[in-house]
Amino acid sequence: MMMIRKAVNIFLCLLMPAVLYGQKTDFGIWYEVKAEKEIIDNLRFDLEASIRTDQDASHIDKFYREPGLRYKFNDYLTAGLYYRLIEQKEGDGSYHPRHRWFMQVRGTAPSVYRFTIAARYRIQQQFKTYIKDPDDEVPGWYQRLRFELDYNIRGYP
């Protein structure tokens, strides 16, 4: 038992630098507005607008508008195609547009013991208009995978 306790303490001491340097002092706030409208059965038009701040929420880093279409295959699976027009603050201090399109698939498992698990896979391509070096002219491809675990608290709306 003493050997296990020592091993845990050593592990925690080795993990300490990662914890100490893992947090930035800067923070930002994301403001979002979303709307959706069903066009026909299971096909929806989505519209989102967002403002993202940085430097302790005192400066606007970027803002964007994002229309898209989303299809609901069943209660557990949806897929969508979206376009995002981003105005991002660049190195010269001005806002320059970026164009991004993406496709995403979202799956949600049925609830088990008030827990719901979901995953979203997104593939996207982004085009920059602020060209600082030759690599900026090449569109960037990105893939993202996000997992969510939700708990439904009884009696809490």
Image: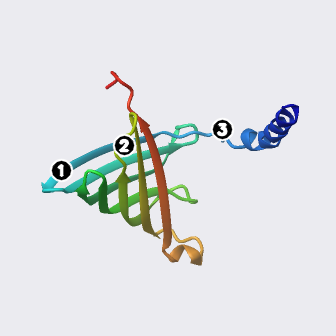
User: In what element is the residue under mark 1?
Assistant: strand
Residue 96: where, in percent of width, then height? 45, 61
Find residue 87 and report its image quarter.
Answer: bottom left
Q: Which amino acid does label 2 sit on?
A: Glu
Question: Between 96 and 145, which is closer to the camera in this rendering?
Answer: 145
Nearer to us of marks 1 and 3 is 1
Q: Which of marks 3 and 2 is nearer the N terminus?
A: 3
The residue carrying mark 1 is 37
Q: Is residue 4 left or right of residue 94?
A: right
Q: Is residue 131 left or right of residue 64?
A: right
Question: Judging from the image, what secondary structure is the residue with disc 3 in?
Answer: loop
Residue drawn at (84%, 39%), measured in percent from left and top? Answer: 7
Outermost residue, front direction?
A: 1
Residue that appears at 32% across and 56% down: 66
Residue of label 2: 32
User: Residue at 83% across / 35% down in the picture?
Assistant: 9
Task: Tell me whether the residue at label 1 lies in contact with that at label 3, contact meaning CB atoms closer than 8 angstroms.
Answer: no
Q: Residue at x 31, y 26 (%)?
A: 157
Q: Which residue, given by chain and number where applicable, does mark 3 sit on?
A: 25
